[in-house]
Image (spheres, helix red, strand yellow):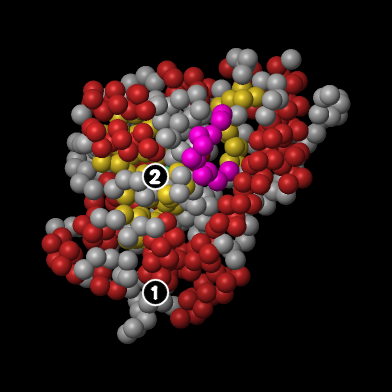
Amino acid sequence: MKPQSAEKIKFTKEFTKQEPIPEAGIKRALELMQTGRLHRYNTTDGEISEAVLLEKEYADYVGARYCLGLSSCGCAIYIALKSAGVSPGDKVLCNAFTLAPVPGAIENAGAVSVFVEITEDYLTDLEDLEKKAEQSGAEYFLLSHMRGHIADMDRVIEICGRLGITLIEDCAHTVGCRWGDKFTGTFGKAGCYSSQTYKHLNSGEGGLLVTDDPDVIAKAILFSGSYMFYERHLSRPSMEVFERHKKQIPNFSLRMTNLAAAMIRPQLADLDTQCRRWNRRYNLLETELTGADHIRIPKRLAKEGFVGSSLQFTLTGADLPGVQTFIETCGARGVEIKWFGAKEPVGFTSSWESWQYIKDRQPLPRTRKTLDFMCDFRIPLTFTMEDCKIVADVIKQVAEETFD
Ligand SMILES: *Cc1c(COP(=O)(O)O)cnc(C)c1O
């Protein structure tokens, strides 16, 4: 039976509307504004700033030794690379399916991105990772868990260990996600998370860096712009570690504000509940779309504890003009689908071909083919389960009209 006869379904809600900041966050933010103490080091004797408290709570949440709050995830990645030892001219492996701030962070560190193919299931192609590691001699791998798809971390760790590669994780889309029983961001030298408005925690802008390495966190704190106040951090190693680095590390002024931390703390306390709410919506959409003509949703690996805050599917039996028509028609019916197959970068969506500041980019046919047929949309928590059902119905109806 067809989803709904000839009548064209239309969806009217915004794909970019977030939920409000929790009351406790608003209250705390207002109190801070009343005191004027918005800077993380503007504390009186014995007072502990919001940023410091958040760092302690986030490190505890993911099970890392140390955490540092920063002004964005992009700069958390940049600082993580620098603190892990990346020097100008070094090569950094990175899966090609990622967002522009990721190669941007590599560029900012003066390093060179070496892109790795992804598979039909949107995961880093681990055979290509080995190949590119050997060809390039890169000693760093910045793994971006793009759209929350988590590659086989057991194999990633094995490959990095065997080839002597330092792993840094970009967890902008995997806040609250695990591989097995371990949080993403805790598998390598450092993990970086985002609290930018469109991610799982919302403080407008913001980033968090975690590591177990005392030298990495000391350097990161110094890079972030701690002046000589690093003793006020709770999530830090002993003062001797800072002594080693304090005159060697420039101050890049990339601190998190107390206001951002005040908004994030109550959201962190609710994060697991919010992740379950995302997954209920994702599961409904996945169930509705699975088995529909021309739509393939990749299987997830068994150990992947993902959070379905967005959904990707591949159009099958379609050609490129067909994909374009499909996406335009969905858009006209209120379902905003993002496409990494477009020739020109649009909105948040650009692909590695557009990052021309990186010289030696190699063709990536497997990634290109995957992205040409991949459709991508957000699942905001402001959507009800009924909303998700309508979105699925529109997609199925448009697929049927476009390809049959
Ligand atoms: C958003 C995003 C980032 C950067 O996060 P910001 O906090 O905006 O700097 C990094 N990686 C991915 C995959 C992202 O989507």
Kindly indicate the quadrant of the structure image that contains residue 155: top left
Give the vertical position of 393 relative to 305 (above or below). above
Is residue 244 something that shows in the picture?
Answer: yes
Give the vertical position of 379 relative to 118 (above or below). below
What label does residue 87 carry, if any?
Answer: none
- Distance of label 1 from label 2 (alpha carbons): 26 Å
Q: Are marks 1 and 2 in contact (CB under 8 Å)?
A: no
Is residue 330 something that shows in the picture?
Answer: no
- Is the residue indicated by label 1 positioned so its CB lies within 8 Å of ligand 1? no
Depth check, front residue: 74 or 176:
176
Could you tell me which secondary element the residue under label 1 belongs to? loop
Q: Is residue 16 left or right of residue 131?
A: right
The quadrant the C terminus occupies is top right
Q: Which residues are magenta?
A: 298-308
The verdict on residue 396 being magenta is no
Magenta-drawn stretch, dominant element (helix, strand or loop): loop
Residue 299 at x, y percent in the picture: 56, 30
- Name the residue that disc number 2 marks: 170
- Name the residue that disc number 1 marks: 49
The verdict on residue 299 being magenta is yes
Kindly indicate the quadrant of the structure image that contains residue 152: top left
- What is the three-letter code of the residue carrying label 1? Ser
- Badge 1, how many Cα within 10 Å: few under 14, some, many 20+? many
Depth check, front residue: 260 or 67:
67
The quadrant the N terminus occupies is top right
Depth check, front residue: 293 or 354:
293
Residue 192 at x, y percent in the picture: 38, 50
- Is the residue indicated by label 2 positioned so its CB lies within 8 Å of ligand 1? yes
Q: Is residue 176 left or right of residue 131?
A: right
Residue 364 at x, y percent in the picture: 39, 21
Q: Is residue 333 left or right of residue 44?
A: right
In terms of sequence position, does the residue under pointer 1 or pointer 2 come before the other? Answer: 1
